Amino acid sequence: MTKNLAIGFDEALKLTSQWISPLGSETVDLLESVDRFAAEEYFAKIDSPSVDASLKDGFAVLSSDVACAAPDNPVRLKLIGSQAAGGRRNLSVCPGNTVEVLTGAKIPNGADAVVSGEFASKDDEYILVTNNAEPGRNILPKGSDVSAGKSIVKAGQPLTPGRVGILAASGHSRLSAIRTPSVAIVATGDEIVAPGLPLPEGKLYASNITTIAAWCRRYGMRVQTDVVKDDPDELFNLLKSTAEKVDAIITSGGAWTSDRDMVAYILDQLSWNKIFHRIRIGPGKAVGFGLLSEKPVFVLPGGPPSNLMGFLQIAMPGLMQLSGHPRPGLPVANARLASDLRGLHDDWTQFVFGTIENHPDLPVFYSLRNESRLRSMAEADAVAAIPEGETFIPEGSIVKVQLLGQPNNLSGGYQ
């Protein structure tokens, strides 16, 4: 399937989604699964707690023994033993007796309540209780946190720290999670130099690949970066060998139609399946997407704003889908515009970098008009969109904005 003409943003997102499926699963330790997605449903293996347990340091009693207990009417009970958390003593409470229990301790047989230690005092071998305790008071029933056989995590759900914790409590130490993709980011151009190397006059550092790699790392992806000159043979060999080693490729630069913009040409030579190349978005119209050796390839322009916006709007949702994310895209929120937004074309989607300022009713979005492209991108913590069909959104309007300041585990972007 090929597209020679620029397509709309919604169509580009739809096509990207249609051609990408989550990677296979792998079994990993619980801590290695954090922020990934469950490949299958998991059920509790055990009850937790495994016994009726005390919620307080205090005294296990029969509630009927202390029903009338009060500061001016203390109840005297014989202390017959003590039980700590994890203790295995098989103690029993009968009328007139009590057992001292620490938090987490097994409730002795016969007891149906725990009197908190603050309402009891020791008197030799006896306890004076000054408060009542109805049945169940300060007792955590067996299986109340986790019940054996109950579903704990559904397939496809994000493995948040909380879910990883309850999986541990329910008897799991390893689980099957969607594999995290490995991503190769390839920058092209005679004028660029890999960060860290000496910078000759007239050259510039390949900051685009560092920015994109940082975004990929934020979402737990494994990243390799390469810088290649405008040499067709070198680019051909690099893309061919890279496609055999990674799960996805992102190219940066060389995406347009000049003599030195050869990425699409080389991908054609490699017989990639081009899905589209050029989208009606600004910045980022030269974005392309296809498959090379069944691996997703995202073609991004070299200009920093176009490069980052193309990544955020197309490549990143695609990579998140590859990771098993049920709703790929940046998290979104409603915000009020601090100023008018104006687009250039009514048949394009125009994206605007900005900052968010919290207000009592709604956050306010301020568009960035910094003379430095890189500084504007670095300062931005949100993106607003002027959708296709519109060229003007007035100040004070409430719009959805994408949030750049936090990873997305639950909500989706402009989908």
Image (tube, grey):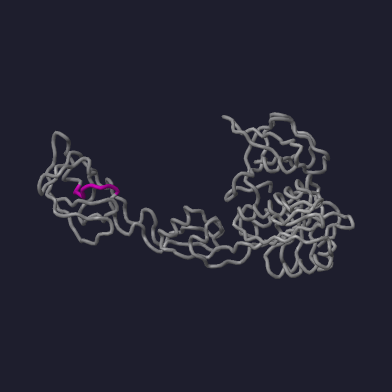
**What is the quadrant of residue 15 in the picture?**
bottom right
Direction from residue 81 to residue 189 in the image, left or right = right
Residue 61 among those drawn in magenta: yes
Give the farthest residue toward the right: 259
Identify the residue shown where x is 62% and y is 33%.
357
Label total for image? 0
Q: Nearer the viewer, residue 185 or 14?
A: 185
Is residue 156 shown above or below 364?
Answer: below
- As for residue 188 lying within the magenta part, the answer is no
**Vertical placement of residue 248 versus 8, above or below:** below
Q: Is residue 258 left or right of residue 110?
A: right
Residue at 79 percent of width and 66 percent of height: 272
Q: Is residue 266 above or below residue 341?
A: below
Q: Nearer the viewer, residue 204 or 384?
A: 204
Q: Position of residue 330 (x, y in %)?
A: 64, 47
Residue 119 appears left or right of 267:
left
Give the extent of the magenta segment.
55-62
